[in-house]
Image (cartoon, grey):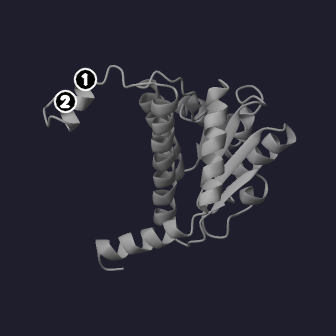
Amino acid sequence: MVSLQGYSSQLSEALSLVDQAAVDRLYQRILFTLEAGNTIYLFGNGGSHANAHHIAGDYQKSLALLGFPAKVFCPTDNSCYLTAASNDIDYTESFSLTIGPIVSPNDFVIYLSGSGNSMNLVKCSTKCREQGIYQASLTAFQGGRISKIVDLSIHIPIADMEIAEDCQIIIFHFIKQRLTEYISTTMGSSRVHADKYLRRISEDNVA
């Protein structure tokens, strides 16, 4: 790979391997969870955690602008919690510790992972399954252990961590646009408090 075009071609090929029906199911479950007033929790490590962090904030803001409540969170965004739990117990238990006290049976848990074999994700998904919590995963490489535990697995069979993480964020951006369109057309919502945003992107003004 010697050019951006070459990287883009690999990313496009990876996206072509994504099961559209599985993405549709993920979209429907996200919508179902939010309309029911329940919460979506995202877990990941490293770049996948950064994507989870981005997705949670992006969904919260974008749907709030439509007047639609979006309870989407990363339980491990708090570094005080994560370091304390890892130090006092073990890092591999830091995600599963939230299942029950924070994550409830009617919530929806989503894992972002390259390998799907990180022990903290495996322990968390196993505990969720024991408690009947619906869960999904986005993984690459061989799919990993969590892809066999969750209720909905989106497996992108590529051996490239960077492209796997690119696919994660692209899939969730795509779903967010579908949610935005659905909420705007079906529920009659329109953007609120978006004057500065519109000035920046439509009028090319500093705001």
Q: Which mark is residue 199?
A: 2
Q: Residue at x 55, y 73 (%)?
A: 159
Residue 64 percent coordinates (x, y): 45, 24
Residue 26 percent coordinates (x, y): 63, 47
Q: Which residue is more in the foreground, 114 or 199?
A: 199
Q: Residues within 10 Å of mark 1 (few under 14, many from 20)?
A: few
Q: Is residue 104 left or right of residue 4?
A: right
Q: Amino acid at mark 1?
A: Asp
Q: Which residue is more in the foreground, 158 or 172?
A: 172
Residue 184 percent coordinates (x, y): 45, 31
Work out which quarter of the rendered image holds the N terminus and state it.
bottom left
Q: What is the residue that sits farthest to the bottom in this orientation?
A: 2
- Residue position for label 1: 195
Check whether the beta carbons of the residues at disc 2 and disc 1 lie within 8 A of each other: yes
Q: Amino acid at mark 2?
A: Arg
Work out which quarter of the rendered image holds the C terminus and state it.
top left
**79 in relation to 8, above or below:** above
Q: Quadrant of residue 200?
A: top left
